[in-house]
Amino acid sequence: MSSASRFSISERKFFLRSFDILFVILGVVFGASFSGFYYFDLSSDSIMTWFVTLVIYLVFFSQILEMYSLKKSNDYFTMIKSVIGTAFFITVLYIFTPFVAPELPANRLQIIYLFLAIVLPLLIWRIIYIAFVFSPKYFSSIMLIGGEKENESLKNFIKTKAPTNQILACISSVVHNNDDELMNYDLKDANISDVMKRHSISEIIVSKYDITQYNNIHKQLVQLFKEGASIISDRKFKEREASLIPEMEFNDAFYDVLTFSKNHQNRFYLIFNRFFDIIFSLIGLLLFVLISPLILVGNIIGNRGEVLYSQNRVGKKGELFKILKLRTMITNAEKNGAEWAQKNDYRITKFGKFLRMTRLDEVPQFINILKGEMALIGPRPERPEFVKNLAEQYPFYSIRHVIKPGLTGWAQVHHPYASTVEDQEIKLRYDLYYIKERSAFMDFKIIMKTMSTVLFFRGQ
């Protein structure tokens, strides 16, 4: 299998989206060809509008229900759950938008037919995808070059974080011949070009090794790079696959690891973000007012104390502000001093667990957003007591304060629970990745992932 026949991550997701759309349209057309399913009239002048609306709903809900998560799309149970959920939400919304979709049918059985016309083609296509398309022969073929420790770290990373990459060869300072699935070569005398041809390698990942001791490897890599071979460092590979900044050390120069997105100085992007923050906050606060009676009742029964509380947090440029939240913990929860909330924390009340799972405890922060202390998207604001400690332990921690803290963010949708210093370090790397790659498209992805988090009750 040549490298040209393998899919990259973006290609695979585009492939999934395209065939989702194709199969749903074919399913509706096939269903409409039978007299029993007359909700879709293929001869109508509005047929193109109906199909465009259907496709928009499909793309929107399938994104929220994580149908394009490569890891989840390859599991039968998760796939079936996502497909059924997507088809259900599309059907419900579609029948209630008659101006851009067919009129609500008098015969309610037509709604069931519409659901089946969406769900069955999607299930058939996704089963075909798992059985035939998601195959190691379509994975990216990888060769590792580097020290023994670095290569072992990469093997573990690819196994857990980048499973659509297949390691076919490993050139290392120490050769292990007991791995039947992996061809191993010695750094001293390896011919990289021959190894690439033998295993149809599509990408080379280079980690740290002694260039002075293995200068022949360095010369070969330079030549292959000039010939157009895909060569990437282990750090860049991890950043690309996991969407976070790789591990950093105090002796790293920050400009070697981190650059600021040009959108930090893009006035149009910043003005649009602020406008969106205000509109979204007003809508959020209006919905909060509507459900506030239920919140008050739940608080009386399950919390028995004040509904709101405020707390000092570190904002943009390190300035302190008072964050607003719905109370989820017992009274005097921090009588022994500030501490991180733990999973299954005994201090969280029964109603507080519900508020955290649904993220309703964060809704009062729309007030902070309207005041300009926070944004809808950005690193979560931390308490000054924790910030001081974390800044001493991890390099570049204070860089996350270069932008406004957010109600949600890249770190929240990828690593939502942080109860230890180690978890905070991982979230820092996600936050710095957002600062580096910040864009309108990335903000949109965060909003979609946040909706998934709320929908599946993944709140802390």
Image (cartoon, rainbow, N blue to C red):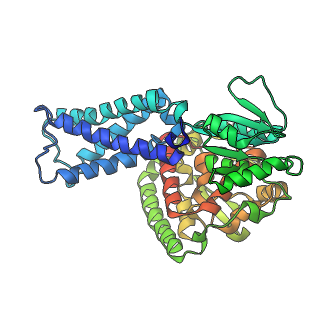
At x 60% / y 53%, what residue is drawn? 410
Residue 357 percent across, percent down from the top left:
55, 42
- Where 430 sits versus 436, above or below? above
At x 33% / y 51%, what residue is drawn? 56
Between 180 and 308, the one nearer to me in the picture: 180
Residue 435 is drawn in which quadrant? Answer: bottom right
Q: Taking 107 as reference, is 430 left or right?
A: right
- Is any atom of residue 199 visible in this view? yes
- Where 82 sits versus 208, above or below? above
Residue 422 percent across, percent down from the top left:
77, 45
Between 401 and 257, the one nearer to me in the picture: 257
Residue 46 percent across, percent down from the top left:
16, 53
- Where 70 sits versus 75, above or below? below
Residue 383 percent across, percent down from the top left:
73, 58
- Where 228 sits versus 74, above or below? below
Between 399 and 250, the one nearer to me in the picture: 250
Locate the C terminus and report the quarter of the image it occupies.
Answer: top right
Q: Taking 453 as reference, is 18 left or right?
A: left
Residue 45 is drawn in which quadrant? Answer: bottom left
At x 67% / y 50%, what residue is drawn? 231
Residue extending furthest bottom?
267
- Is any atom of residue 343 visible in this view? no
Q: Taking 456 as reference, is 312 left or right?
A: right
